[in-house]
Image: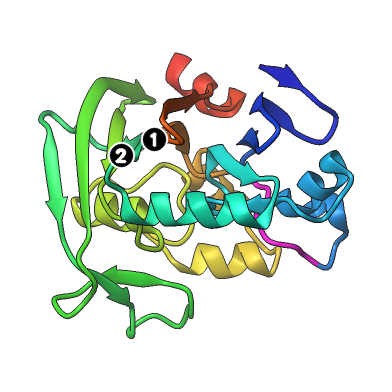
């Protein structure tokens, strides 16, 4: 893995660029310039505008993002990832509470009509099917409070799926402003009015979700990409 000024590059070929997206960086273009988004940085790095994100991560989620260097490759890989037959995604998550056993969270997701936040979804019986498998890696303790490091495997790709499912199971992700115990923190974050009490409650600047692994078969070859979690994530684990 090499670190470029614009991107942390995991792998690169004539067709693909694979990067470790940093936590806090949005994927889509923003009004704050090319360096303020992943796709803008990709275009600067490639020195052309043909780079296309094949998968996307939430702003605060770090980890593996696959970029196609042409529209044709993006089409191929987009169909492959959507079909999901040979695709495996694995995430690391730090959550509140002790998760003592493996979980299979099979709960449909849809818009949260009781929230004032337009982007917020929730578990609802008439939602789209969604399944997430969870395996505890180890228990943690900070200031007398229990936390868990989890290996998470989503089988579907719904918006905010992992974050919603873990909160639904009673184990919200550390630092999650939207699906934690107070969704108003998300609004204060957007307005840049987070209070010292908010920051103390969140524990981390960005939520503790990291896309560690992406693998699939393409053009007759097995492809496997992995990357380490950010320093703040690892620092929480080390206490």
Q: Residues within 10 Å of mark 2 (few under 14, many from 20)?
A: few
Q: Tell me the number on the disc at residue 216.
A: 1
In the image, residue 52 lies at what x, y percent?
Answer: 66, 54
> Helix, strand, or loop for circle 1?
strand
- Residue pushed farthest front? 220
The rendered magenta stretch, by its main secondary structure, is classed as loop
Badge 2 element? loop
Check residue 26 for magenta coloring: yes
Is residue 162 rendered magenta in the image? Answer: no
Q: As drawn, is 230 to the left or to the right of 219?
A: right
Image-quadrant location for residue 160: bottom left
User: Disc 1 vs disc 2: Cβ atoms closer than 8 Å?
Assistant: yes
Residue 130 in the figure: left or right of residue 103: right
- Rendering coords of residue 38 (x, y %): 71, 49
Determine whether 190 is above or below 168 in the image: below
The disc label shown at residue 115, or none: none
- At 25% from the left and 54% from the top, the residue drawn is 165
Q: Nearer the viewer, residue 164 or 46?
A: 46
The front one of 228 and 16 is: 16
Does the rendering let one see residue 59? no
Indicate the position of residue 171 as horizontal and vertical percent values: 26, 45
Disc nearer the start of the sequence (1/2): 2
Image vertical order of residue 38 relative to residue 120, above or below: above
Q: Residue placed at 12% from the left, 33% from the top?
A: 102
Q: Is residue 192 above or below residue 11?
A: below
Q: What residue span does the magenta drawing correspond to?
A: 24-30
Where on the picture, by quarter, is residue 106?
bottom left
Q: In the image, what residue occupies the spot 49% across and 49% down? A: 77
Q: Which mark is residue 86?
A: 2
């Amino acid at each position: 893995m090499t670190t470029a000024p614009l991107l942390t590059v995991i792998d690169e070929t004539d067709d693909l660029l694979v990067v470790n997206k940093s936590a806090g960086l949005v994927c889509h273009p923003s009004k704050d310039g090319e360096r303020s988004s992943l796709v803008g940085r990709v275009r600067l790095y490639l020195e052309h505008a043909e780079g296309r994100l094949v998968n996307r991560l939430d702003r605060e989620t770090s980890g593996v993002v696959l970029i196609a260097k042409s529209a044709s490759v993006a089409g191929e890989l987009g169909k492959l990832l959507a079909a999901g037959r040979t695709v495996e995604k694995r995430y690391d998550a730090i959550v509140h509470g002790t998760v003592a056993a493996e979980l299979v969270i099979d709960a449909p997701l849809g818009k949260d009509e009781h929230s004032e936040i337009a982007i917020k979804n929730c578990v609802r019986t008439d939602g789209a099917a969604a399944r997430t498998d969870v395996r505890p890696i180890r228990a943690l303790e900070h200031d007398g409070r229990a936390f868990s490091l989890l290996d998470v495997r989503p089988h579907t790709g719904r918006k905010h799926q992992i974050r919603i499912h873990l909160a639904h199971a009673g184990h919200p992700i550390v630092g999650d402003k939207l699906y934690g115990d107070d969704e108003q923190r998300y609004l204060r974050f957007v307005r840049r009015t987070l209070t010292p009490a908010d920051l103390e409650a969140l524990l981390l600047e960005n939520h503790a979700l990291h896309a560690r692994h992406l693998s699939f078969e393409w053009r007759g070859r097995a492809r496997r990409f992995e990357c380490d979690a950010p320093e703040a994530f690892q620092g929480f684990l080390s206490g």
